[in-house]
């Protein structure tokens, strides 16, 4: 049951990425190119995707706080961390730089595999390598000359 | 703004939000793609089959949309091979270091009104804007 519901959610998520055009890096980059506002070439679609996503997700998160368990069994695991630390910001900056270089973030990159392009496959393998690299190195050193110390 | 597609963006975004909300209510988990994929890459990760099912669904979703009449999907990568690889590594490492991506921090985190996710979203948005500005307007690639 949990496997089926996860598959259903993945299908809906992937369909949403496809319909919104977010599996096309050029559409994402057209949003990130804010200097194009002046020339009239800016594409604000991504902001509408985020807005639509937030509106649709909000009631579920409200509901989740009032439930003791998930419908398909087990607990509802909401994140508990509230700290804003170095890794959160440096990780976000690194992710954003890679996102701006190619135009793929993790979801759209995996969904775009459906189109079977070599560039997408290479990007996804590099992304998986980056994730494994983070795991085996344990992230950045506690005191990194480039980023400064990490608390905790 | 000739390429602006507000209606399909809202509908597609709505589906993404619906999928994230359903995943939370049905399976009790946050639909953060980098978290799902990242924990699948660990040797002793939990709930492997449902995470794999979610990832398979991400690929099946667009295949269903292609099958509909009137939908032509494209995914155009213009970056060179070294940039594709560097970008992929940065996205993979950065999302794990920062505990999330556009889905986990962006959609789910902001839906929870998490200040931590808001800061992460501001960080990756800013870096995205700056990177594209440098590429397109300073070095003119």
Image: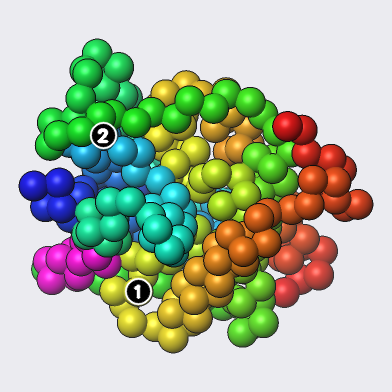
What's the distance in space between the residues labelled 2 and 1, CA to CA? 27 Å
Image quarter (top left, top right, bottom left or bottom right) of the C terminus of chain A: top right
Q: What label sits on residue A64 in the rendered view?
A: none
What is the quadrant of residue A115 in the picture? bottom left
User: Which residue in the protein does label 2 denote?
Assistant: B28
Q: Is residue A11 left or right of residue A33?
A: left
Q: Name the element at disc 2.
A: loop
Q: Position of residue B9 (x, y in %)?
A: 34, 47
Which is nearer the eye, B60 or B49? B49
Residue A78 in the image: above or below residue B71: above
Neighbor class of circle 2 (other Cα within 10 Å; few <14, some 14-19, many 20+) is many
| Dominant SS type (magenta) | helix
Asked if B13 appears above or below B75 in the picture, the reply is above
Q: For mark 1, does the 10 Å Cα neighbourhood hold few (<14), some (14 to 19), or many (20 or more) residues?
A: many
Q: What x and y, as percent, mark residue A97?
A: 68, 57
Label 1 SS: helix
**How does the figure colour the protein chain or chains?**
rainbow
Q: State which region is magenta.
A: B56-68
Look at mark 1 in the image and give the residue it sits on. A113
Q: Residue furthest top?
A: A66
């Amino acid at each position: 049951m949990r496997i089926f519901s996860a598959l259903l959610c993945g299908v809906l998520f992937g369909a949403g990425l496809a319909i919104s055009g977010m599996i096309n890096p050029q559409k994402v980059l057209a949003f990130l190119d804010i200097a194009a506002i002046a020339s009239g070439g800016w594409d604000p679609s991504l902001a509408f995707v985020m807005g639509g996503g937030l509106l649709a997700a909000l009631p579920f998160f409200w509901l989740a706080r009032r439930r003791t368990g998930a419908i398909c069994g087990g607990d509802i695991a909401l994140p508990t961390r509230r700290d804003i630390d170095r890794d959160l910001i440096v990780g976000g900056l690194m992710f954003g730089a890679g996102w701006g270089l190619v135009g793929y973030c993790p979801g759209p990159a995996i969904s775009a595999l459906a189109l079977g392009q070599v560039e997408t496959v290479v990007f996804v393998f590099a992304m998986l390598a980056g994730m494994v690299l983070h795991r085996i190195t344990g992230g950045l050193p506690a005191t990194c000359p480039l980023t400064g110390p990490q608390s905790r | 703004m000739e390429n602006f597609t507000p209606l399909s963006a809202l509908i597609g975004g709505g589906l993404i939000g619906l999928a994230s909300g359903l995943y939370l209510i049905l399976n009790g988990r946050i639909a953060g793609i980098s978290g799902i994929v990242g924990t699948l890459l660990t040797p002793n990760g939990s709930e492997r089959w449902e995470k794999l099912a979610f990832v398979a669904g991400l690929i099946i979703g667009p295949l269903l949309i292609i099958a509909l009449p009137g939908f032509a999907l494209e995914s155009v990568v213009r970056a060179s091979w070294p940039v594709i690889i560097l970008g992929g590594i940065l996205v993979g490492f950065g999302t794990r270091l920062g505990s999330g991506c556009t889905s986990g921090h962006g959609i789910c985190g902001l839906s929870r009104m998490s200040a931590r996710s808001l800061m992460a979203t501001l960080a990756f948005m800013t870096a995205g804007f700056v990177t594209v500005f440098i590429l397109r307007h300073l070095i003119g690639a």
